Image (cartoon, helix red, strand yellow):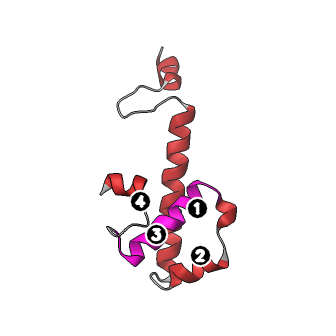
Amino acid sequence: MVVAVREDPQGDLFDDRERAALRLADIIAGDHKKATDDLFDDLRDHFTEPEIIALGWRISIFTGYGRFCAVLGLDSAGNTCAIAEAAGS
């Protein structure tokens, strides 16, 4: 399933609700300016307004976390942050 998210997020392994959520994640993580009224109309077919907000919030948190880890050079779990090492010495 994880490979399918990367290779075919709009494929048959996912139902309409999951595909809508994956589209939102792709747009938030990629080009957020592509978040159109059509996207939110589609999301409303599958989620309530509070669910859309919660989903967007979680996507944003994890996207930001991933980008911050990349900036720090933490490209895999278990690596040590150079900033923390310098502060501890």
Mark 4 or 3: in front is 4
- Alpha carbon distance from label 4 to label 3: 14 Å
86 is higher (above) or lower (below) than 81: above
Q: Which mark is residue 39?
A: 2
Disc 1 to disc 2: CB gap under 8 Å: yes
Mark 1 or 4: in front is 4
Q: Which residues are magenta?
A: 14-31
Residue at image point 52% right, 18% down: 86
Location of the N terminus by quadrant is bottom left
64 is higher (above) or lower (below) than 83: below
In the picture of the structure, the residue carrying the numbered disc 1 is: 27
SS under mark 3:
helix
Residue at image point 47% right, 73% down: 20
Q: Earlier in the sequence, mark 2 or mark 3?
A: 3
In the picture of the structure, the residue carrying the numbered disc 3 is: 21
Verify whether residue 61 appears in magenta.
no
Q: Earlier in the sequence, mark 1 or mark 4?
A: 4
Q: Amino acid at mark 1?
A: Ile
Q: Earlier in the sequence, mark 3 or mark 1?
A: 3
Q: Residue furthest top?
A: 89
Q: Earlier in the sequence, mark 4 or mark 2?
A: 4
SS under mark 4:
loop
In the picture of the structure, the residue carrying the numbered disc 4 is: 8
| Majority SS type along the magenta span | helix
Residue 4, image x, y percentages: 35, 57
Residue 69, image x, y percentages: 50, 37
- Figure quadrant of residue 76: top left
